[in-house]
Image (cartoon, helix red, strand yellow):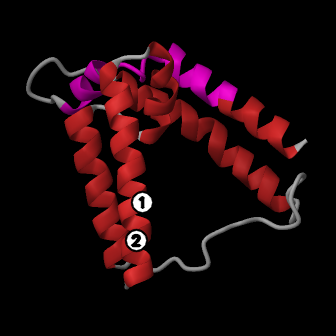
Amino acid sequence: MRLFSALLIGLIFGSGIALSGMINPAKVLNFFDLAGDWDPSLALVMAGALAVAVPGYRLVLARQRPALAPAFQLPDTRRIDLKLVAGSITFGIGWGIAGFCPGGALPALGTLRSEALLFVAALGGGLLIARALRRAG
């Protein structure tokens, strides 16, 4: 049941990303181009996601227990440290350069565009490097 739920949630999320056009890196990059061909649609997609996620999280967390797991897996700290800031900066730079974030890149794999394939390969490499650095440190 957990695997089916994950698949269903992933399909819904990926469909939303695809329908909103966020699998197109040019559309995302135009959001960051304030002085040129600015496209506000990414902000609208994010606002719509927050409008659904915020009440959804409040409802789910109020239950004190997830439906398909023994406990919630939430961060155990709210501390803003160097790892968090460095990771956020790295994420933002990669998003600004490539026009993809992981949430948009995975559904974009279905287009078989080389940019999406290259981004997901680089994402996997970055995850392996981060894991190795975490073990070493």
Asked if residue 80 can be seen in this view, the reply is: no
What is the x, y in percent for residue 107?
52, 25
Question: What SS does tag 1 mark?
Answer: helix
In what quadrant of the picture does the C terminus appear? bottom left
Residue at the disc numbered 2: 132
Using a 10 Å C-alpha cutoff, classify the residue at mark 2 as few (fewer than 14 neighbours), some (14 to 19) or many (20 or more): few
| Residue 84 in the image: above or below residue 95 | below
In the image, which residues are magenta? 11-32
Q: How many numbered dots are placed on residues in this image?
A: 2
Q: Marks 1 and 2, how far apart in space?
A: 6 Å
Amino acid marked by disc 1: Leu
Give the residue at x 32% y 32%. Answer: 118
Residue 108 falls within the magenta-colored stretch: no
Residue at the disc numbered 1: 128
Of 95 and 40, nearer the camera is 95
Give the residue at x 16% y 28%. Answer: 33
Q: In screen coordinates, is 110 left or right of 134?
A: right
What is the x, y in percent for residue 55?
70, 46
Give the residue at x 44% y 40%. Answer: 102
- State if disc 2 and disc 1 touch (CB < 8 Å): yes
Which quarter of the figure has residue 129?
bottom left
Using a 10 Å C-alpha cutoff, classify the residue at mark 1 as few (fewer than 14 neighbours), some (14 to 19) or many (20 or more): few
* Disc number placed over residue 68 in the picture, else none: none
What is the x, y in percent for residue 58?
74, 54
Give the residue at x 45% y 14%. Answer: 111
What is the x, y in percent for residue 26?
26, 20
